[in-house]
């Protein structure tokens, strides 16, 4: 125990001496801090895109909702359901019932929906973007109770009117209340905007499914049914009733389960790109740290030799060099993490969801986990950059170095 305590005392003494000399090497030290900070900022910023996208999808689903599509469909785009089938689903045991209008009779909270993609110009660039246009039934607003009108009003049933999500309004042009849009030879009027707590719906445009069907020659077909269940526990009863009905060929998922699977392709691309770019930049940052620490060792040659002559062990010297490199790297990591948080957290953007081939608006999300990952990545770069100079310092010939005094 005494020898261990002595070793730690030596490490503390050598490291303290090294840190006090940093101002004399502030140029090289600052370059290392800034270099590593830049790598961490890019690392955190890129991965925050994936986190924001994932959060947007995760908040879209509700444990009280079930989603029904044709069996074998990977997404709404691939599914087709006929009206007769959707009416059977609405009457299935387990579906909640409530009045859709004040004073109205209780009705099944089941919305058969149609999902198409329309071209809307992006703000700034003016280039076309694939924006989701969702046709819904009256129960859609009860199925998604978090949806709130932020401007204008709801569309009227049976009219060519559109409700615009706040995310879509901010990212795409021509979607202000009162705007008129034309797709497939049909003119639509924007009558209101809505928010949904940052969920996926804010990327969409909503209209009456009965109006959207003839506009896109969809006949009596839909693509999915969203049903509000009596409780989350009613899901199995609802699912069993539909999957065992010989009139139907469907798959039933919890809404949260469906959206958890969406966006996997984009998330994989973002994470792969983020790690690849960060590793390439990290190589440069490690070489910068190597240069800094080699310079530090060279500047402290006589000092290290003196300490070795006084009985300080090689291990203490190695630990002190690594500690200095780690502290410089950590400073850079904290700088980069703070820069990424200050510049990108909450930044609104849109991207193509490769699973639905439509635009999704989202906010960058710089989470605590990403900040910790960034700091850990910085420490790793510092240790890689300090290991060779530390070994060189430990192997420094004491007699030769002392002759330089």
Image (cartoon, grey):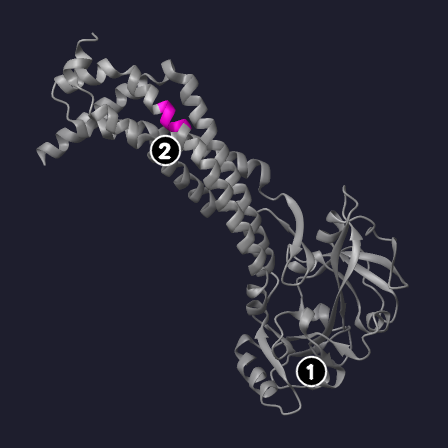
Magenta stretch in the rendered image: 288-292
What kind of element bears circle 1?
helix
Residue 83 shows in this picture: yes
Residue 9 shows in this picture: no
Q: Residues within 10 Å of mark 2 (few under 14, many from 20)?
A: many
- Give the quarter of the figure containing the C terminus: top left
**Residue projecting furthest to the bottom:** 246
- Front residue of 251/142: it is 251
The label shown at residue 382 is: 2
Q: Residue at x 77, y 78 (%)?
A: 221
Q: Residue at x 85, y 63 (%)?
A: 161
What kind of element bears circle 2?
helix
| 263 sits left or right of 115 in the view | left
Query: Residue 9's x, y, as percent?
Result: 18, 27
**Circle 1 is placed at which residue position?**
90
Quarter of the image holding residue 186?
bottom right
**Image height of 183 relative to 382, above or below:** below
| 154 sits left or right of 352 in the view | right
**Residue projecting furthest to the top:** 405
Mark 1 to mark 2 CA distance (whole Å): 60 Å
């Amino acid at each position: 125990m005494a020898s261990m305590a002595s070793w730690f005392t030596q490490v503390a003494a050598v490291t303290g001496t090294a840190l006090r000399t940093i101002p004399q090497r502030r140029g090289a030290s600052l370059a290392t801090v800034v270099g590593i900070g830049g790598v961490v900022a890019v690392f955190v910023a890129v991965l925050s895109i994936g986190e924001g996208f994932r959060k947007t999808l995760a908040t879209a689903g509700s444990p009280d909702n079930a989603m029904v599509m044709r069996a074998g469909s990977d997404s709404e785009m691939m599914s087709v359901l006929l009206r007769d089938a959707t009416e059977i689903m609405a009457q299935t045991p387990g579906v909640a019932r409530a009045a859709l209008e004040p004073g109205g009779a209780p009705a099944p909270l089941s919305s058969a929906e149609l999902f198409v993609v329309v071209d809307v110009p992006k703000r700034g660039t003016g280039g076309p973007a694939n924006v989701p246009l969702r046709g819904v039934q009256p129960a859609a607003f009860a199925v998604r109770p978090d949806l709130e009108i932020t401007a204008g009003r709801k569309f009227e049933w049976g009219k060519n009117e559109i409700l615009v999500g706040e995310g879509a309004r901010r990212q795409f042009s021509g979607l202000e209340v009162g705007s008129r849009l034309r797709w497939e030879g049909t003119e639509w009027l924007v009558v209101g905007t809505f928010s949904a707590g940052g969920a996926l719906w804010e990327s969409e445009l909503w209209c009456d499914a009965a109006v959207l069907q003839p506009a896109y020659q969809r006949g009596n077909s839909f693509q999915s049914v969203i049903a509000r269940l009596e409780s989350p526990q009613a899901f199995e009863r609802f699912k069993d009733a539909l999957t065992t009905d010989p009139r139907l060929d469907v798959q039933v998922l919890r809404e949260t389960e469906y959206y958890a699977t969406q966006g996997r392709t984009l998330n994989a691309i973002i994470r792969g790109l983020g790690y690849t770019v960060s590793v390439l930049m990290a190589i440069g940052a490690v070489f910068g740290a190597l240069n800094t620490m080699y310079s530090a060792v060279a500047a402290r040659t006589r000092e290290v030799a003196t300490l070795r002559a006084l009985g300080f062990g090689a291990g203490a010297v190695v630990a002190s060099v690594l500690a200095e490199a780690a502290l410089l790297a950590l400073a850079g990591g904290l700088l980069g993490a703070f820069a990424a948080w200050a510049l990108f957290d909450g930044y609104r953007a849109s991207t193509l969801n490769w699973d639905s081939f439509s635009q999704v608006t989202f906010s960058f999300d710089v989470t605590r986990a990403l900040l910790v990952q960034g700091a850990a990545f910085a420490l790793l770069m510092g240790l890689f950059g300090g290991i060779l100079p530390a070994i060189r310092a430990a192997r420094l010939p004491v007699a030769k170095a002392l002759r330089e005094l």
